[in-house]
Image (cartoon, grey):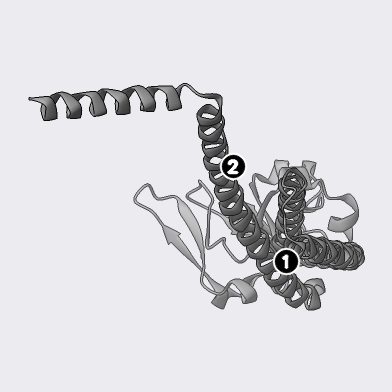
Amino acid sequence: MKTIKFYAMITAFAFLSASCVENSEKYKTAVAQRDSIAIEKQALDSNYNRTLSILDDIETGFSEISYSQSQMRINLKGAEGKTTNKKELIAAQMTSIKETIEKNKAKIDELRQLVSKNAKANNKLVETIKRLQSEMDEKSVQIQTLQTELDQKNIKIDELNTTVNNQSENIAEKQSMLEQQTTKMNTVWYYVATSKELKDAKIISTSGLFQSKTALDNELDKNVFTQVDLRTVTSIPTGSKSIKIISSHPQSSYTLVTGDDKKITIEITNSAKFWSISKYLVVQI
């Protein structure tokens, strides 16, 4: 029985001692230090992981910039002979490079801020930041050189475009003139009318003779004629049952076809030959 009481007293004393220790200032200080160390370790781990992530992003950015630079230089070599799409591609590459540079600058600034907040940052990390900043400065200079080269290329491209546009305009003008000349060469006229109408239009003389070409050119009222293209016209309706072709046209180049209504149509069988003597077809009805 005495033994049991003894152990009970020992146990009670132990609990009282533990309680006293937990309430002591030394214990509280130790716990606070432990928690502070844990928090600091957690912060250090977080900063360390963030630092690695930033470094990885920066290196990736530099790789992208270097690749874009090489692609731009390839494109710039043949820029003068390329289309507007090629110029747009080069401009887009330059924009992408500049955006990546700005992102890298922001990442380096963030990395520098992390280091400044950490008094225990090692010298190696500080040197790494210096190296990255130096590389960033070098890239900025390279991109400025590229931008200058791009500006110069754009000027040449604009000059070439102006030359090409002028040449295109000249070609278009010559083409238009050629088409006009071709149209003029292939333009013919015909007039189907009574004897009185032909005299009034000074197409035939008062004696009934067909005017000479010179007289037609000088005095003829072409408004009474129907203008057609000899390459496309193949038949000319007269609307009459009896006709007389006043102008000169080889007989072997046409036929007279009488329709069911007994009215005559001039069918041209050889266009070039038909209009070879006169470009004016005059039919008296």
Q: Secondary structure at mark 1?
A: loop
Q: Quadrant of residue 276?
A: bottom right
At 75% from the left and 45% from the top, the residue drawn is 113
Residue 35 position within the rendered picture, expressed as x and y whole percent measured from the top left: 52, 35
Q: Quadrant of the N terminus?
A: top left
The residue beneath circle 1 is 83
Q: Quadrant of residue 117?
A: top right
Q: Is residue 157 visible?
A: no
Residue 231 position within the rendered picture, expressed as x and y whole percent measured from the top left: 60, 66
On the picture, is 257 further left or further right than 281?
left
Sort mark 2 into few (<14), some (14-19) or many (20+) by Cα contacts within 10 Å.
few
Q: Secondary structure at mark 2?
A: helix
Disc nearer the start of the sequence (2/1): 2
Q: Is residue 182 visible?
A: yes
Q: How many marks?
A: 2
Asked if the residue under mark 1 is in contact with the one under mark 2, i.e. CB atoms within 8 Å, the reply is no
Q: CA distance from mark 2 to mark 1?
A: 60 Å
Sort mark 1 into few (<14), some (14-19) or many (20+) by Cα contacts within 10 Å.
few
The residue beneath circle 2 is 40
At 38% from the left and 26% from the top, the residue drawn is 17
Amino acid type shown at disc 2: Glu
Residue 173 position within the rendered picture, expressed as x and y whole percent measured from the top left: 84, 62
